[in-house]
Image (cartoon, rainbow, N blue to C red):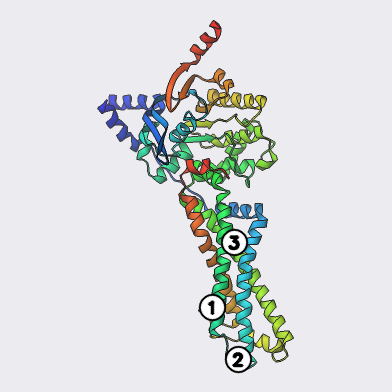
Amino acid sequence: MSNQKEEKVIRKSTWDVGEVSFPLGEAFRISIENIKKRFARAAITSASVMLGIAFLVSLLLMASFQTVSGQTSGTEPYMYWLLFISLLVCGVGITNSMLIAVAERYKEIGTYKTLGALDRHVLELFLLEAIVIGTIGGLVGYFGGLIAAMIYAATNSSIGIGKAVTALGLPNPTIPLVGMLPSAVALFILGIGLAIILSLAATIYPAYYAAKLNPAEALRYEI
Amino acid sequence: MKSNWGDYMSLRYEYTVETEDLAKYYKLGSFVVKALDGINLKIRRGEYVSIMGPSGSGKTTLFNMIGGLDRPTRGKVYIDEVDISKLDAYELAWLRARKIGYIFQTFNLIPVLTALENVMLPMIFAGVRREERIRKARELLTLVGLGDRLHHKPAELSGGQQQRVAIARALANDPAIVLADEPTANLDLHTGLEIINLLRKMNKERGVTIVTATHDLKMIDVSDRIIYLRDGRVERIETRAEVAVEAEME
């Protein structure tokens, strides 16, 4: 009997354990399909990112415009607080919708694992989804903010479109991190970057939790 | 030395699944639920085994243990003579991809993927080339009678058709075992029978070992052996010959 047991231990090496893979291209395609399937919620999540970024872009642009027209000396400290709070609120919103998105897919996650997915493959699926949602939200938010700021400039007699366009091309040192670039470019980079970071940060916890579930638990899960 | 190797090979090919004193306890508050309590089983290559028992008898837990989906509290599970409790996460993923095919009561197809893509998915994880994936998935779907439904999504298929896709998916990487947890429970009588016959056909023609957890009596007719579970223990084991004799005596 003991002899037999030893033999079994040796035999572990007789399995030729090969590769387990999940190419990024396939993961990306599935993420896009997932977003399309749950389009309404993805759009709402994206809208939450969009509003946060639009607020950021319009606030900082208005400050730029006012500086160019000689009204103020740029971004006031309280504005950073406003931005911080607005992005925080937006982050809570995204985390909430990502928690739901993950919870309703526990069973699917379990299924992926039975087919050979590793934890990081599951994580990959959700993080890719977050990046796509963040990018779309950031892009739309940037242009939304830009339009809002231009409307503000056009309706304000002391600024006007002309000065606003000049301000877009000039660097605004009060814009955090990328203040040396022309305002329009700086806010584009800052806006989309923040949108992706925000969306990823909000998704990491739920996605990590989902990826760590053991398959039996995930499959048992009913909502 | 040479004869040892021969012994080893014959052993390797005798049992696909072996459990030794397998137990799984769950803690519910101060309560300990013994879902499985000392299961010893040996399932031969190419066998069609049904695990029967009332709900709560431990069928699904046993399914999860054999399938490497959960860790036992005590005891061992050998798949192709390898103790799977010794495997790390990567090796377990490989085991699930290559050695075991799963079929579920609720079909569990990925809703955003077509039938073809669902069957291709385990081959993606197993690192099969794209052309080969497509060829194999088409072949399997044709085999289960869905050659004309390749590009339908699960929501566009009936329950029976979805289960056929699931069977094709389970066979994608030529696993050593197909584990089916109540595969007919969500299907009507007729469709359930079709699925059972399909499983039997795969077992006969492709030599796949099939283990089903079920309380569908139709499954008895096609099983080589029936293992009855009760309260987490093996109550009795019947071979088909015995079942046939019993039926005759009645």
Which residue corresponds to mark 2?
A72
In this orientation, does residue B151 appear?
A: no
Q: Secondary structure at mark 3?
A: helix
Residue beneath label 3, please?
A132
Quickly name the residue at label 1.
A81
Q: Amino acid at mark 2?
A: Thr
- Residues under labels 1 and 3: Cα distance? 27 Å
Please say if A122 is above or below A176.
Answer: above
Label 3, label 2: how far apart the Cα atoms are: 37 Å
Q: Chain of mark 2?
A: A
Residue at figure coordinates x 67%, y 56% from the top left: A39
How crowded is the residue under tag 2: few (<14 C-alpha within 10 Å), some, or many (20+)?
Answer: few
Image vertical order of residue A161 relative to residue A203, above or below? below
Q: Chain of mark 3?
A: A
Q: Answer yes or no: are tags 1 and 3 on the same subunit.
A: yes
- Name the disc covering residue A199, or none: none
Q: In the image, residue B43 lies at what x, y percent?
A: 43, 24
